[in-house]
Image (spheres, rainbow, N blue to C red):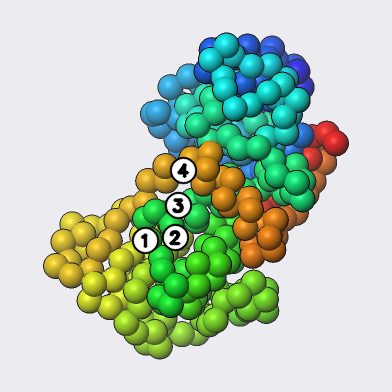
Amino acid sequence: MKTIAINQYGSADEFTMVDMPTTEPQADEVQVAIHAFSLNPMDIAGRMGALSSPFTDLWAFPLVLGWDFAGVITKMGKAITGFNIGDAVFGSAAPAHAANNGTYGEFITVNTKELAHLPAGLSFDQAAALPIAGLTAYYGMKHNLKLQSGQKILVQGGAGGVGLFAIQIAKAFGAYVATTASANHRDLLTRLGADEVIDYHETDPAAVLHDYDAVFDTVGDIDTGLKLLKADGQLATIAGQPTDEQQHDQQKKVAFQFTQGSSQDLADLAQLVVSGQVKLTVTTLPFSVANVTKGHRSIESRHTTGKIVIHVTD
């Protein structure tokens, strides 16, 4: 199969087209012909050699990166139930995958823990944008913060891949949503449902927001988030490690989020998109070394809005 791989850790210039063998599914796995995959900040960390165990346990060079995908099942293990050959699916690969089994290629073999059927009304390109960023936000709102209708939440970093999902999912849950972003993103975030957009370059959120029930931090600014929480509020961060002092606040709860999503969570997230409650901000590029390189550079610039999807085949 054709893959876009690296032969050593380094810059985005390391990508090259490599023919590699496909992997056969084990009893609890399916093989998927990839129609689209998306890029994530985690991919950049992997390319630079900044990830460690368990991600790198099975890695060698040439290395195919990537976790998010959408496609069609081509082979199945003997123990698989609930899926059939020919099913359109989307999901995320396991954190530790073999060197030739990332998503930057034509096929991938995965278990079904984070695999869901592609619903009517959702394209492969759209579905490929959902798993890591979307599931991180959905897990944060539903399972971690247990956000309820009428509560107030601040999403720190609303214009990023996870932040865009978090704002809309929080609104779908009936919350009042404030977010931080640069001024040039205000119109987009307002259209997506944010009740307040605070330009963090000009205004300290803690100076204007008070008594919030929850904070979802995607930028690593835990101190600011804690200042605006109510006494029994909760803060979940995906971008920083809380200090001992922050974790031992006698009233407020703060913790790093370890996302443990499921196939059902993916299916529920997809329905929010199909119903129009979550709108996707996606840049789609054809499958090529040049476009994967371009996507990595865009994410590294920290000025990417939404998700970058690589379209492999129709």
The image quarter containing residue 239 is bottom left
If the image is split into quadrants, where does the C terminus sit? Answer: top right
Residue 114 x, y percent position in the rendering: 53, 35
The three-letter code of the residue at mark 2 reads Met
**Which residue sits furthest front?**
82
Residue 70, above or below 221:
above
Disc 1, disc 2: CB below 8 Å?
yes
Specify the label residue 261 is tagged with: 4
Q: Secondary structure at mark 3?
A: helix
Q: Earlier in the sequence, mark 3 or mark 4?
A: 3
At 22% from the left edge and 76% from the top edge, which residue is drawn? Answer: 231
Specify the label residue 139 is tagged with: 3
Residue 274 x, y percent position in the rendering: 70, 56
The residue singled out by tag 2 in the image is: 141
Specify the label residue 145 is tagged with: 1
Q: Secondary structure at mark 1?
A: loop
The three-letter code of the residue at mark 3 reads Tyr
Q: Earlier in the sequence, mark 4 or mark 2?
A: 2
Which class describes the residues within 10 Å of circle 4: few (<14), some (14-19), or many (20+)?
A: some
Residue 91, above or below 185:
above
The CA distance from mark 3 to mark 1 is 8 Å
Disc 2, disc 3: CB below 8 Å?
yes
